[in-house]
């Protein structure tokens, strides 16, 4: 049985074992990532913590910025508020200056007029993809020395993930995929009752996607389709007819390493409720791709 880690505003809950446990109690845990047997977390918005051999230790803390996402490539990357990116090496934070010089950065925005944030990041081999909301997805294949914009920023990407070299983006108008490192994109919406997508993950040869009526949610649901393409089908078994709130970015996950589509009606999922910020399932010898 997969172990489910649920990041909440009151600590990290572990489900699926003999008894539920709470770690980092009374702390707000907003993001989880894994590397091998280690679990990393963003705590109270600014602190980066690591669990190794069952013990939690603080690794570092952001200054003047809020940490928004983590990803392990050949090193740890930390996305932040105001659309910045840091790399973490042996406990030392270094701002990725090349990320701040991306072509078109001055056009990034938010619908409410505030500064954009780095929202999600993922990798496959040497290719790293970072999603800015609202600023599209930028790509590097030279360890962050240079970055290039990919998808149109007005696609309004909410999460990027990767699998077998494919890039998948949950967007305001459905899901977009690329098989040439973001040079071109294909859109997939067949079968979706609503196209506003917030979360995406891959389960073997199946893609799972959350959609709703729009930014305020309404008739939110999970859909599945073959990763190779095809019509989306709404997941129903074991789930409510609809979720009221959005199933938000990073709140949809699947066991790492699973092959096949037989059980894809049972993903780990939470709607965007105030008390639950992210789900992570299982353990893997490689990081979960975010």
Image (cartoon, rainbow, N blue to C red):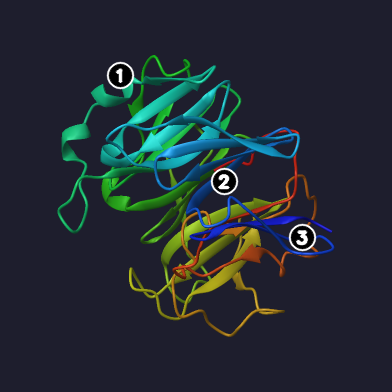
Which comes sooner in the sequence, label 1 or label 3?
A: 1
Q: Which quadrant of the rendered structure holds the N terminus?
A: bottom right
Measured as percent of width and height from the top left, residue 60 is found at 47, 29
Q: Is residue 70 visible?
A: yes
Frontmost residue, 150 versus 49: 49
Nearer the observer: mark 1 or 3; the answer is 1
Q: Which residue is mark 3?
A: 261
Q: Nearer the viewer, mark 2 or mark 1?
A: 2
Pick the front one: 212 or 35: 35
Q: Earlier in the sequence, mark 2 or mark 1?
A: 2
Residue 150 is left or right of residue 286, and the answer is: left
Question: Residue at label 1?
Answer: 97
Q: Nearer the viewer, mark 2 or mark 3?
A: 2
Q: Residues within 10 Å of mark 3 (few under 14, many from 20)?
A: some
Residue 155, position as x, y percentages in the image: 32, 52
User: Which residue shows up at 80% across the image and 55% down it?
Assistant: 260
Secondary structure beneath label 3? loop
- Mark 2 neighbour class, 10 Å CA radius: few under 14, some 14 to 19, many 20 or more: many
Task: Check whether the beta carbons of the residues at disc 2 and disc 3 lie within 8 A of each other.
Answer: no
Residue count near mark 1 (Cα–Cα under 10 Å), binned few <14, some 14–19, many ≥20: some
Tally of numbered discs: 3
**Nearer-N-terminus badge (2/3):** 2
Above or below, 111 against 286 in this view is: below
Q: Say what secondary structure mark 1 lies in.
A: helix
Give the distance between the C-alpha atoms of the residues marked 2 and 1, in whole angstroms.
25 Å
Q: Which residue is label 2 attached to?
A: 32
Q: Are marks 2 and 1 in contact (CB under 8 Å)?
A: no
Residue found farthest to the bottom: 241
């Amino acid at each position: 049985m997969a172990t489910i880690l649920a990041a909440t505003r009151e600590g990290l809950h572990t489900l699926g074992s003999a008894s539920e446990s709470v770690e980092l109690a009374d702390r707000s845990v907003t993001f989880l990532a894994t590397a091998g047997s280690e679990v990393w977390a963003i705590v109270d918005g600014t602190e980066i913590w690591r669990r190794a051999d069952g013990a939690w230790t603080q690794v570092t803390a952001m200054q003047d910025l809020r940490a928004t996402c983590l990803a392990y490539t050949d090193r740890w990357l930390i996305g932040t508020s105001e659309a910045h990116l840091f790399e973490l090496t042996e406990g030392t934070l270094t701002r990725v200056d090349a990320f701040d010089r991306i072509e078109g950065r001055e056009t990034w925005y938010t619908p409410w007029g505030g500064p954009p944030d780095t929202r999600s990041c993922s990798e496959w081999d040497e290719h790293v993809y970072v999603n800015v909301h609202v600023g599209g997805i930028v790509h590097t294949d030279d360890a962050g020395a240079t970055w290039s914009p990919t998808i149109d920023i007005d696609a309004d990407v909410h999460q990027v993930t990767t699998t077998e070299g494919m890039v998948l983006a949950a967007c305001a108008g459905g899901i977009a995929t690329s098989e040439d490192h973001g040079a071109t994109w294909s859109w997939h919406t067949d079968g979706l009752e609503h196209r506003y997508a917030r979360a995406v993950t891959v389960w073997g040869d199946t893609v799972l996607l959350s959609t709703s009526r729009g930014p305020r949610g309404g008739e939110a649901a999970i859909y599945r389709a073959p990763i190779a393409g095809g019509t989306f089908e709404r997941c129903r078994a074991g789930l409510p007819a609809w979720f009221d709130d959005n199933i938000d970015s990073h709140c949809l996950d699947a066991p790492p390493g699973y092959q096949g589509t037989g059980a894809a009606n049972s993903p780990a999922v939470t709607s965007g409720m105030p008390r639950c910020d992210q789900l992570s399932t299982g353990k893997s010898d490689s990081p979960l791709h975010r």
